Image (cartoon, rainbow, N blue to C red):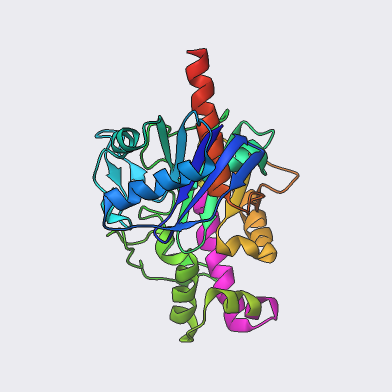
Amino acid sequence: MIVCFDIGGTAIKGAAAFDNGDIRPVARRQTPLHDFDAFASVLTSVIAEIGGEPECVALSITGIIDPDTNKSFIANIPCAHDRFLKADLEARLGLPVVIANDADCCALAEYGVGAGRGHRVVFSAILGTGVGGALVIDGKLINSAGGFAGEWGHGPVASTRAGNPPLDLPRFACGCGLEGCLDAICSARGMEKLHRHLTGVEMDAEAILAEWQAGDAGATRTIDIFIDMLAGPLALVVNVTGATIVPVGGGLSNSAPLLFELDEAVRSKILRRFARPLVVRAQCTVEPGLVGAAVLGFDALNQKATA
């Protein structure tokens, strides 16, 4: 048995995992943001509530571990930021600790028990508040030592001319400090920004998608450009990685018509031809962070056993 956690800036979710398909959550706790002692104490309390003798602790957490320094970069949980988080937690919890980014854990979940089952190369994309992703090959995270691999949402790659007919677009500023990132224009907030730029109308992403489905001309134009901007970079990711399935999570994945259009557009732009959908909705929509953390933890134990 292992204890797995899905840790975000608002809540800490914990569970006992007996295998990848037997995960038993406990009540969630609020995330202490500014007090590391309190943060570690919450994890300790979950472990105590679960009881037994866990073999390790596996964490899915927002942010990344820098592979060069082994320090954490977790901006929205200040007490866990810029520290040797693995070593610090192992000292406090008295158990081996493995850590991965939340998007990486979603990819592991999809590979292990979701849409990625049976595929060697799985690129898991996140389309929600932000644009993110992770790559799993033969069951292993490509960045198992930490790092930014899979973060296709950042980098100045967004088109400045898109849509049918084509329209010239500015390079929108991104929160990472660059301009022209997909995260700035192809996230849910980006869709809203694009719609406002095109129509002058303030509308949330859910409403834009509803108006598009109802045939509204302004929303249809927004989605046309949105898909065009997103499909090219995602097609390049597929060509570079050789992914044979792209499970999509995040709030925008709830729109089946949007994913259908994105899949059609991506498959028209890649070198390999698929006679089946490539871009699909993630199947692990309930607690994917906990599922992915469990996969991560059991994989670490298996590696230790065979070493």
* 264 lies left or right of 251: right
Image: 5 above or below 228: above
* 192 lies left or right of 32: right
Residue 70, how many percent across, how many down?
28, 35
Outermost residue, bottom side: 201
Image: 268 above or below 223: above
* Residue for point 24% across, 46% down: 82
| Observer able to see residue 235 | no
Q: Nearer the viewer, residue 166 or 259?
A: 259
What is the magenta range? 211-234
* 55 lies left or right of 39: right
Residue 24, how many percent across, how many down?
61, 45
Image: 178 above or below 221: above
Outermost residue, top side: 307
Q: Quadrant of residue 205?
A: bottom right
Q: Nearer the viewer, residue 269 or 212?
A: 212
Q: Main secondary structure of the magenta part?
A: helix
Magenta stretch contains residue 98: no
Q: Nearer the viewer, residue 21 or 202?
A: 21
